[in-house]
Amino acid sequence: MKERAPGESRVALTPETAKKFAALGATVAIEQGAGLGASITDDAYREAGAEVGTSADVISGADIVLGVQAPDPTQLTGAKPGVWVAATFDPFRNGELVAAYAAAGLEALSMEFMPRITRAQSMDVLSSQSNLAGYKAVLTAANTYGRAFPMMMTAAGTVQAAKVFVMGVGVAGLQAIATAKRLGAQVSATDVRSATKEQIQSLGAKPIFVENVAGIEGEGSGGYATEMSEEYQKAQAELVSAHIAKQDIVITTALIPGRPAPRLISDGQIASMKPGSVIFDLAVAQGGNVEGSVPDQTVEKHGVKIVGYANTANHLAADASALFARNLYNFLSAFWDKETGRPVLDEEIGDAVRLTKDNKVVNSRLAD
Ligand code: NAD
């Protein structure tokens, strides 16, 4: 379907995946103009064997609807009862949408709830989109910064390398480190999960870690972060305060599933930075890691520019769509049942991603 969320340019099906679904025996249809934001024409879909039509046309016969951001159930009027909708739902923050899916008898499959297991890596939209977001965050920060990233020795004198600090070293953070290194910056990074120390070093960056404080492990189920002890948070804030004052660029990426993003940078810490420094807050849409950050705005505080996009991967819509669409294809094709001509999900992945079925909310992560 064509995305309806304001500003959303991505698309959940590409000509490449349309062809692959057709090869499985599926009939593939896409709403006209759905790919334009990602520079994909209707003709490109037609050449790949997909039908192109109005939203009513494509919905009416569908067994499975694909989306980047889940459509409102009112946009699925006329769909078959129990139709599957595979998309992102942001389920912890969108309780009303999930309830509306249940009420409408739609089966919501939330791609954010893909379990973090080896076999599901190729199906994981959070990883594919975060990776691109980490890259774009560094480029945007570099663009906003009034100085260069690499050290340059010129006839007119030396330009110093920028100091870049990455806070939160998950998928986005690792790509941010790699991108900043490629641009020639001096890079350091921190996380609450001590397992990231080695990963930071292997990318040639400097780990900044609180040592010898209880509650440092910070790793919960599935490799996600948990909320840290108070003692840890205090020690981390002190270490960060000292480090941050010396940085030119800070990229923050810290998220905790189901909770608002942890606050990592206070107004006082911003004030300690040099004028002209730049902070990119990748968590701005989840409440923000940085005090005062506003989605899609450049906020200037104490001479420091604070930037953050509500939807960072959207700024690389063509690649983000290509990867998102492959994630969906990898997911559905892994379970394809030739006899029925549609996927049959197993318990481990099916129960993890399914939010609603038979007019009920059925996901255990949404139980409370
Ligand atoms: P995320 O987006 O949930 O969070 C980003 C990072 O912020 C994480 O590294 C987290 O530890 C860190 N963080 C949270 N609170 C923080 C704080 N107060 N201070 C500093 N950092 C903080 O994480 P993610 O990118 O989705 O990845 C989390 C882990 O899961 C990684 O180890 C990743 O490699 C792993 N992973 C595995 C799979 C798989 O096996 N299929 C898929 C994706 C990710």
Image (cartoon, grey):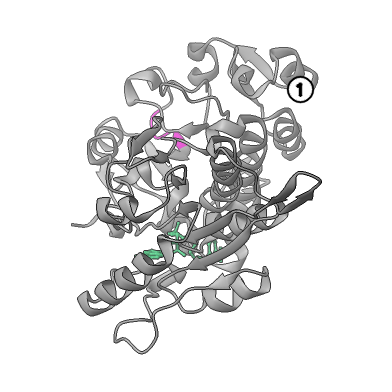
Q: Looking at the image, can residue 206 be seen?
A: yes
Residue furthest left as drawn = 368
Q: Residue furthest front?
A: 156
x, y percent for residue 199 = 60, 73
Tell me how many marks there are: 1
Point out the stretch of residues depicted in magenta: 81-85
- For label 1, the SS is loop
Q: Is residue 157 above or below residue 59?
A: below
| Residue holding disc 1 | 49
**Observer-nearest residue: 328 or 26?**
328
Q: Residue furthest top?
A: 54
Instruction: Name the residue: 50% across, 32% down.
Output: 67
Residue at x-position 46% and y-position 22%: 7
The quarter of the image holding the C terminus is: bottom left
Q: Is mark 1 within 8 Å of ligand 1?
A: no
Find residue 130 and report its horizontal and vertical position in percent.
54, 49
In the image, residue 265 sits, relative to residue 74, either above or below, namely below
Q: Position of residue 98 (x, y in %)?
A: 29, 39
Point 30% across, 82% down: residue: 215
Left or right: 3, with 29 as reference point: left
Q: Quadrant of residue 359?
A: top left
Question: 25 or 183: which is nearer to us?
Answer: 183
Would residue 90 be visible to someone looking at this image? no
Type of amino acid under label 1: Gly
Residue 222 on the magenta segment = no
Residue at 48% in and 58% down: 247
Please name whichever residue, 73 or 242, is drawn nearer the observer in this view of the structure.
Answer: 242
Please identify the dominant SS of the magenta region. Answer: loop
What percent of the width, then of the height, locates residue 353? Answer: 43, 52
